[in-house]
Image (spheres, rainbow, N blue to C red):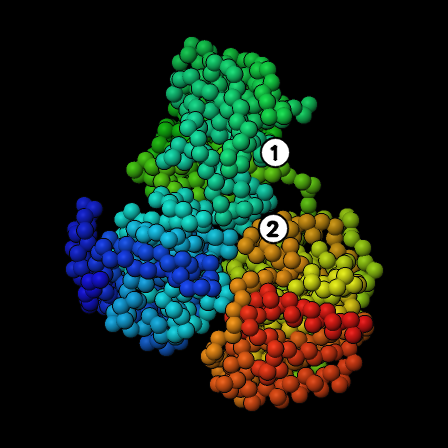
């Protein structure tokens, strides 16, 4: 590897001259603002860099070894971006500390915004695109709607994993690569393959958890790609920062989530969770043509990580999804071209099974509909060419054919003329366009839009009889929008009489094409492609008429003819998700235990925070409710006639960030098992991975509500607001204690940091957590909200997530946090033990027994006087154990079940996943012992 070091302060004008012809980029061409930037030039070569490892027991996403050849030049920062540099660009929206230290506690999206701003400052192209920005109350960027990146552009960006490893593998070239802070890289996380890959740039799209890769850090190997928990683009941590790279990547290669090579990937850029804002359902499908391969592709947003390509040799244009969302009709002809066309229907599955062909001479531009009598039919035309000539137009005709049980019926001619833009439900209006906008109104034919040129005509698939179309910058459109514009720059909407009522402008640098109304419950959505200055259809977008927004759905090289299906609307709903003021949220009248924790009546004031996305959702999501209210629902039934707000009910995720994603599954478990479970498990990831509900004896019905990053405040919140009021059969509560994490209080809890900005929790709090009765449909609505599919084991295993990779404890283990935290952390200890005490007391009022469990950790921590992964001196632990023992003496319903035993435990060979988590074998032993313990408490 050839590496050169440069101090950069070069004129941007010279830089542009260097690469405007698409040639190479010499080192002297690096631009800079008035801040010096120290970067390494890394020259392309035929040497390979190794990603991953072949070590036995390696994580599945870190193996096998994969060789990567980087044949292009790029530059990379010598040092990580500092806090001072970050604040100079980010306008000090994040307080990251001293100017000279590496910036940490930033998200992947924060790094992206920084890179783009640096590119703008230095007159470079921006690598990253997005349609809107969302910040949390602390100034972190937690969402970039429509996010995508373009590695062929010359601008600042995050390095790829392969670039980072290439530099980091040379010890003398990256002095801080393996210092304390880990670093974001650009790639989506995916799998490797045992081959040589040229110019590898990561996975072609995000996996189900939308994971990103972090590299480096003092405790990492060169092949390590993450931390203890998955890293999403909205994750931030006090040990994760970044550095920048510069340089276009020619012919970047990506691997899909199955490890197959993709040279021109198609990317989903809007998640199902964000799409919900427009569709009000996760049951959405998108079909389009990948013009590069000639095949139809589809996305089922209930499994959004996959873009499925139906490989075939049949030309496929103008696809339309069936009313039930299970089939797709398509043709071989194209609008505007007078040629014979064939019409087919096939199943919307990976094989495109059930292919049938309509046996007629010519059939083009199919459109599904359901008649008043319930019959499913496809409307088509015999020709779809230029309709400006009257005789040519009349030579074609419009037909309808039934489709049932996978077969076509007998076609019926409707009328002369090629009305392929659609027919209204009552058949009183039909429209078409190419090159003029023709309408058939009550059997009389008219030409709308003053006979000016129009195309891509589509009739709304509802009862509004609105027509969408594109034009060619004529005078009618100019008078309506009040300015001159380019061909297809505006999408126009006309009413049932042909009068213009709305227009939507394409984003800067693009024009519309292939516009079509969406099918389904929200009648304000259209789908279209965007064409760039070179004429390439690189984006599929959702056009939402309610706010005239244009939102990116998918990106690729050449995407045509999208069809968007949205499941039909169910019953009308009402009610409000607007947050109530903190003074009106019911709070506990009782104090926390005398151990020193704050009273719950003071909690609301400090948990409020304003979200940039919606002030309505930013008020407190509620704290402990009055203990006198806990037991009012012991015999409650479903409330049948309460109409839930579909924008809020069950919506326990905002960006599906790692913690949100897990808690959204836990909330589904709450509303699934509130009237069934008699044992509930709480705690952190140690409980989450360490207790297996289905292994308990039949006399116990167990649900595991523990979640990663959980602490005693989050346990208290869920127990007090959801479990104790609603779980009417509850007999036992199992709580993970984790002595080394008892410094984590309310300010570290998900239910302080995040839930006040998430609609579902606010909605629950505004309705007193449904203590008067659980509304019918809440479980189903919680289930329907899009979730991260890779965490779905939460449902199938009743909340348990298995860690199947088992190994022995490491021979050397050192705490990641200060082992002396108890010296200054007594107040926090009192707070956290107060939450535990409150749970014990409330449970006692219902004769519910509480078991506090201390999970085993690596016994070798004691060799460094550490109790566990997150600190605490081993010599300090006994005083906390004495406090727990005192609770067992004071409360007859509390049992402390210590399985760590100061490191002298018997969870030994082949029972650990890492230093503080049990693998499945260890979880089985823990579960069997808990099962036996519960029987003795019976």
Q: Quadrant of residue 114?
A: bottom left
Badge 2, how many Cα within 10 Å: few under 14, some, many 20+? many
Residue 128 placed where, x, y %? Answer: 36, 53
Tell me: residue 653, above or below residue 396.
Answer: below
Mark 1, Cα crowd under 10 Å, few <14 / some 14-19 / many 20+, is few
Mark 2 residue element = loop
Who is closer to the viewer here, 461 or 23? 23
Q: 602 or 715, which is in the foreground?
A: 715
Return the x and y of residue 256 as percentages of the image width and height.
Answer: 42, 48
Farthest right residue? 635
Say the numbered circle drawn on residue 723: none
The span from disc 2 to disc 1 (Cα, nearest Å) is 20 Å
Query: Could you tell whether 240 is left or right of 117 in the image?
Result: right
- Note whether 54 is above or below 403 in the view shown: below
Tell me the quadrant of the picture where the N terminus can be found: bottom left
User: What x and y, as percent, mark residue 571?
Assistant: 69, 41
**Residue at the image position 51 percent from the left and 47 percent from the top:** 304
Residue placed at 23% from the left, 65% from the top? Answer: 40
Residue 710 lies, with reference to residue 538, above or below; the image says: below
| Image mark for residue 324 | 1
The structure residue drawn at horizontal position 68% and vertical position 83%, both measured from the top left corner, is 884
Left or right of 67 in this view: 555: right
Left or right: residue 514 versus residue 521 is: left
Q: In the image shown, does 643 or 720 lie closer to the viewer?
A: 720
> In the displayed structure, would residue 229 be above or below residue 556?
below
- Residue 219: % across, % down: 41, 73
Number of the label disc, if any, that sits on residue 785: 2
């Amino acid at each position: 590897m050839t590496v050169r070091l440069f101090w950069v302060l070069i004129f941007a004008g010279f830089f542009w001259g260097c690469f405007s012809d698409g040639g190479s980029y010499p080192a002297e061409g690096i631009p800079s603002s008035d801040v010096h930037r120290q970067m390494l030039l890394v020259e392309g070569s035929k040497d390979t860099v190794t990603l991953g490892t072949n070590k036995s027991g390696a994580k599945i996403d870190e193996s096998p070894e994969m060789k990567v050849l980087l044949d292009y030049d790029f530059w990379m920062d010598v040092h990580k971006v500092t806090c001072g540099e970050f604040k100079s660009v980010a306008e000090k929206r994040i307080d990251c500390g001293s100017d000279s230290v590496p910036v940490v506690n930033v998200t992947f999206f924060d790094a992206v915004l920084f890179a783009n701003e640096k590119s703008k400052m230095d007159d470079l192209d921006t690598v990253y695109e997005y349609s809107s920005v969302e910040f949390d109350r602390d100034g972190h960027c937690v969402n970039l709607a429509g996010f995508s990146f373009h590695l062929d552009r010359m601008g600042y960006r995050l390095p790829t994993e392969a670039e980072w490893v290439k530099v980091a593998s040379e010890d003398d070239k990256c002095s801080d690569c393996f210092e304390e802070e880990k670093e974001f890289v650009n790639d989506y996380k995916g799998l490797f393959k045992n081959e040589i890959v040229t110019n590898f740039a990561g996975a072609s799209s995000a996996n189900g958890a939308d994971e990103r890769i972090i590299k480096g850090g003092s405790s990492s190997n060169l092949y390590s790609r993450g931390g203890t928990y998955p890293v999403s683009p909205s994750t931030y941590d006090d040990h994760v920062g970044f550095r920048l790279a510069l340089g276009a990547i020619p012919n970047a290669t990506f691997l899909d989530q199955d490890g197959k090579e993709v040279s021109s990937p198609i990317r989903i850029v809007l998640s199902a969770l964000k799409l919900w804002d427009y569709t009000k359902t996760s049951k959405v499908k998108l079909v389009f043509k990948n013009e590069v391969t000639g095949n139809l592709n589809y996305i089922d947003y209930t499994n959004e990580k996959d873009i499925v390509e139906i490989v075939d040799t049949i030309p496929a244009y103008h696809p339309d999804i069936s009313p039930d969302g299970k089939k797709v009709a398509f043709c071989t002809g194209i609008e505007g071209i007078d040629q014979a066309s064939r019409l087919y229907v096939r199943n919307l599955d990976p094989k495109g099974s059930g292919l049938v062909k309509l046996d007629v001479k010519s059939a083009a531009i199919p459109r599904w509909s359901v008649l008043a009598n319930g019959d499913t039919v496809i409307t088509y035309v015999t020709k779809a060419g230029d309709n400006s000539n009257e005789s040519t137009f009349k030579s074609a005709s419009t037909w309808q054919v039934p489709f049932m049980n996978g077969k076509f019926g007998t076609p019926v001619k409707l009328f002369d003329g090629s009305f392929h833009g659609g027919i209204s439900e009552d058949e009183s209006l039909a429209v078409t366009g190419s090159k003029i906008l023709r309408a058939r109104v009550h059997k009389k034919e008219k030409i709308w839009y003053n006979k000016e040129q129009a195309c891509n005509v589509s009739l709304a698939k509802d009862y509004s009889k609105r027509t969408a179309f594109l034009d060619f910058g004529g005078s009618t459109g100019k008078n309506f929008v009040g300015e001159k514009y380019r061909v297809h720059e505006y999408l126009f909407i006309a009413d049932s009489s042909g009068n213009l009522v709305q227009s939507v402008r394409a984003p800067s640098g693009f024009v519309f094409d292939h516009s079509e109304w969406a099918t389904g419950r929200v009648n304000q959505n259209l789908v279209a492609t965007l064409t760039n200055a070179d004429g390439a259809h690189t984006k599929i977008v959702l056009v939402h008429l309610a706010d005239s927004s244009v939102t990116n759905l998918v990106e690729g090289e050449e995407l045509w003819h999208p069809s968007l299906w949205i499941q039909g609307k169910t019953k009308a709903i009402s009610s409000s998700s607007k947050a109530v003021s903190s003074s009106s949220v019911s709070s506990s009248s009782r104090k926390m235990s005398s151990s020193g924790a704050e009273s719950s009546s003071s909690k609301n004031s400090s948990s409020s925070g304003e979200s940039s996305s919606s002030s309505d959702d930013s008020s407190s999501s509620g704290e402990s409710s009055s203990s006198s209210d806990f037991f009012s629902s012991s015999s409650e039934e479903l409330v049948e006639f309460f109409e839930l707000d579909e924008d809020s009910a069950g919506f326990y995720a905002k960006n599906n960030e790692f913690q949100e994603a897990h808690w959204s599954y836990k909330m589904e478990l709450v509303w699934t098992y509130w009237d069934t479970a008699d044992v509930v498990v709480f705690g952190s990831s140690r409980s989450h991975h360490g207790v297996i509900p289905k292994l308990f004896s039949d006399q116990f019905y167990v649900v595991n509500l523990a979640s990663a990053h959980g602490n005693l405040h989050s346990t208290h919140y869920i127990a007090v607001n959801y479990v104790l009021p609603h779980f009417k059969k509850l007999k036992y509560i199992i709580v993970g204690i984790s002595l080394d994490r008892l410094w984590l209080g309310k300010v570290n809890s998900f239910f302080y940091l995040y839930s006040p900005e998430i609609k579902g929790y606010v909605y629950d709090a505004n309705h007193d957590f449904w203590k008067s009765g659980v509304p019918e449909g809440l479980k189903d609505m919680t289930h329907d909200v899009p979730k991260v599919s890779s965490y779905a084991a939460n449902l199938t295993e009743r909340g348990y997530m298995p860690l199947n990779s088992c190994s022995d404890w490491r021979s050397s283990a050192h705490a990641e946090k200060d082992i002396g935290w108890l010296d200054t952390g007594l107040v926090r200890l009192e707070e956290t033990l107060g939450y535990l005490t409150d749970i014990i007391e409330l449970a006692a009022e219902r004769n519910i027994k509480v078991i506090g469990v201390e999970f085993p950790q690596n016994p070798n921590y004691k060799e460094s006087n550490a109790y566990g992964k997150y600190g605490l001196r081993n010599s300090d632990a006994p005083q906390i154990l004495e406090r727990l023992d005192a609770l067992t003496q004071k409360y007859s319903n509390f049992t402390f079940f210590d399985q760590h035993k100061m490191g002298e435990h018997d969870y030994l060979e082949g029972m650990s996943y890492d230093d503080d988590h049990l693998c499945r074998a260890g979880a089985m032993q823990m579960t069997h012992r808990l099962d036996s313990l519960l029987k003795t408490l019976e």
